[in-house]
Image (tube, rainbow, N blue to C red):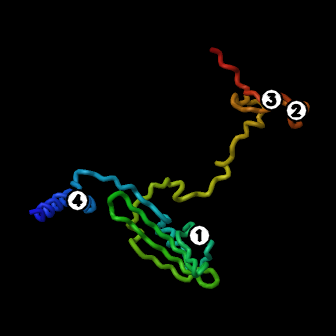
Amino acid sequence: MQQTQLTTGRALRAIPILALLTFSLVGCTSVYVPSFIKIYQPDIAQGNIIEPEQVAKIQIGMSAAEVNQILGTPALRDIFHRNQRETYVFYDKRGKRKAFQHVLVILYDADGRVAKIEQSGDPLSQAPAQDIPEALRNPKQPDDKALAVPDTESNSSAAPSPYSLTAPATSNPALGGGAPLEPTAPALSQ
């Protein structure tokens, strides 16, 4: 009789442990999420943005500097074959959509000239649109006239800016000579 009480006592003590173990293992399984619940997935863009026009400019025989000027700095450089292989990776994943990935490998010969161009992954024509302003996408050469800034400092007839802190003209221009800098704008009355 004492034997049966010991076995039932052990069984009763094992039930909470088994329940705890069962509930902890249930937490490790995947949970069904209804379709009306939207889980945020951030956009992920990594590597180089490669456009078909850029790849078309790359020619056999170009130097590595010319390729880097067109495509930018490569995402990967082969450390075992120095200056012989550069890899440009274009990876873009928007939310829950399928990720776009394109890999461009430039192989160089012993003289540092392009020997072979290899491409793999999704075609560049299917690349997602990039949110890059057109001015940055296709930079144009600046106009000399557009960069000309009128020089208001040299024009003595123009009124000085009320916010400029210019030192008043003194007879002693040495360090520490002259009056301290003060704003030229009149004080506001209250």
Label 1 vs 4, first from the N-terminus: 4
Left or right: 83 as drawn, with respect to 1: right
Image disc number at residue 68: 1
Label 4 vs 2, first from the N-terminus: 4
- Occupied quadrant, residue 190: top right
Mark in front: 1 vs 3: 3
Image disc number at residue 180: 3
Residue 31 visible here: no
Q: Which residue is mark 4?
A: 17
Amino acid type for the residue under numbered disc 4: Ile
Furthest toward the right, the residue is: 171
Q: Which residue is mark 2?
A: 177
Residue 77: percent from left, percent from top = 56, 74
Mark in front: 1 vs 4: 4
Identify the secondary structure beneath mark 3.
Answer: loop
Amino acid type for the residue under numbered disc 1: Asn
Give me the C-alpha separation between circle 1 and circle 3. Answer: 51 Å
Residue 168 visible here: yes
Label 1 vs 2, first from the N-terminus: 1
Residue 117: percent from left, percent from top = 50, 79
